[in-house]
Image (cartoon, helix red, strand yellow):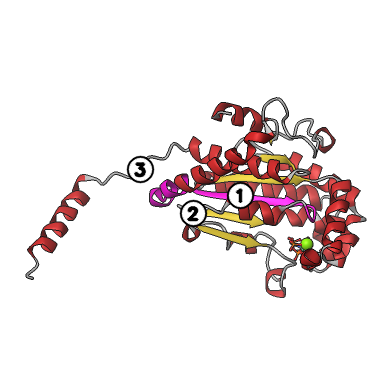
């Protein structure tokens, strides 16, 4: 399988416009049959991880662009495992992973983008968001009491609040992209049935018990509301400069392959070249070399 085929597979999942977007059109079981061959998948993943590491080695010294990858999903969709596998080859010094949990009281005292802004990757770096500002139009939308805890003036919490938040998120992302941030947003699309299967596995296997939390079952009861919120969020914020990838997540090997493929594709599009020294810097290197050579023994 060549790069062109990987690109073709990626296009199936990339969403760059909200027009006509429906989550129901995306099958969590999809494995791009006919384009991708499961047999090749391990090699593709390994190649992708290696290529990503090479591209990071160009991104860092270039120091102008940054890459931000946002991961959103229902519980047990495989965010953690995907991040772990996909990033396994890169130099940890150039990557910052942030997991966004329930906001602290300090965070709640600010606007919702405050904590996100503080975690954006520096130029030359890769930032990974395990959950993100999108929680503000997902969990906060599904649970009214979570919005209450944000202590907004009541005048500002009317019916239009979600539409306003989505517009603000889209504007924030537009701004970041104009600042040299390359943005990829991944929704790991697991099915209701597959989530049940994975929860049972966590409950039945003592080695996996730690991954289970009782609140996961409570959230599962709101599945429909979450899917509606996801659909609206993706539709309102998908753009060519900030695409969403709706990644089928019922098969872990496939999820990982799509994610690494999308990251490699985005960095390759930047067409980064190894940095070459400009003449004045080269002269300085020559001088330094000479001084070392001339050092008395
Ligand atoms: P895992 O369960 O695999 O460890 P996780 O991302 O589910 O990973 P948890 O600690 O279980 O981590 O959950 C974090 C919780 O924080 C989620 O329920 C999420 O919805 C919630 N959360 C994140 N951001 C916000 C926010 N802005 N407002 C309210 N809740 C939030
Ligand atoms: Mg959880």
Residue range highlighted in magenta: 55-76
| Alpha carbons under labels 1 and 2: distance apart | 11 Å
Residue 162 or residue 129, whichever sits in front = 129
**Which residue bears the numbered disc 2?**
125
Residue at the (33%, 45%) spot, across then down: 275
Mark 2 Cα-neighbour bin, 10 Å: few <14, some 14–19, many ≥20: many
Circle nearer the N terminus (1, 2): 1
Circle nearer the N terminus (3, 2): 2
The picture quadrant for ligand 2 comes to bottom right
**Which residue bears the numbered disc 1?**
69
Circle nearer the N terminus (3, 1): 1
Q: Is residue 61 magenta?
A: yes
Mark 1 Cα-neighbour bin, 10 Å: few <14, some 14–19, many ≥20: many
Residue found at the very far right of the displayed protein? 221
In the displayed structure, 37 sits above or below 116; it is above
Where does the image place residue 262, in percent across and percent down from the top left? 60, 39
**Toward which corner of the image does residue 119 lie, by quadrant?**
bottom right
Query: Is residue 15 visible to the viewer in this orientation of the structure?
Result: no
| Alpha carbons under labels 3 and 2: distance apart | 16 Å
In the displayed structure, 177 sits above or below 154; it is above
């Amino acid at each position: 399988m060549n790069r062109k085929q990987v690109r073709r597979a990626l296009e199936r999942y990339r969403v760059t416009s909200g027009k006509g977007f429906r989550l129901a059109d995306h099958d969590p079981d999809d494995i791009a049959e006919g384009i991708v061959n499961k047999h090749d998948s391990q090699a593709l993943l390994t190649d992708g991880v290696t290529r990503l590491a090479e591209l990071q080695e160009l991104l860092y010294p270039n120091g102008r662009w940054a890459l931000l990858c946002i991961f959103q999903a229902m519980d047990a969709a495989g965010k953690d495992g995907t991040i772990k596998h996909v990033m396994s080859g890169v130099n940890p010094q150039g990557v910052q992973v942030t997991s966004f949990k329930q906001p602290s009281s300090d965070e709640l005292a600010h606007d919702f983008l405050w904590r996100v802004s503080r975690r954006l990757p520096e130029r030359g770096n890769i930032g990974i968001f395990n959950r993100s500002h999108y929680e503000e139009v997902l969990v906060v939308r599904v649970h009214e009491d979570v919005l209450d805890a944000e202590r907004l003036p009541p005048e500002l919490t009317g019916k239009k609040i979600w539409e306003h938040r989505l517009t603000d998120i889209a504007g924030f992302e537009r701004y970041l992209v104009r600042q040299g941030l390359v943005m990829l947003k991944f929704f790991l699309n697991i099915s209701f049935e597959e989530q049940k299967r994975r929860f049972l596995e966590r409950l039945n296997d003592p080695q996996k018990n730690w991954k289970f939390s009782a609140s996961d079952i409570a959230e599962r009861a709101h599945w429909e509301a979450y899917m509606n919120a996801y659909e609206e969020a993706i539709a309102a914020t998908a753009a060519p400069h900030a695409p969403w990838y709706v990644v089928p997540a019922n098969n872990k090997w496939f999820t990982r392959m799509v994610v690494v493929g999308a990251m490699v594709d985005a960095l390759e599009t930047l067409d980064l070249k190894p940095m070459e020294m400009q003449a004045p810097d080269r002269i300085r290197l020559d001088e330094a070399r000479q001084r070392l050579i001339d050092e008395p023994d």
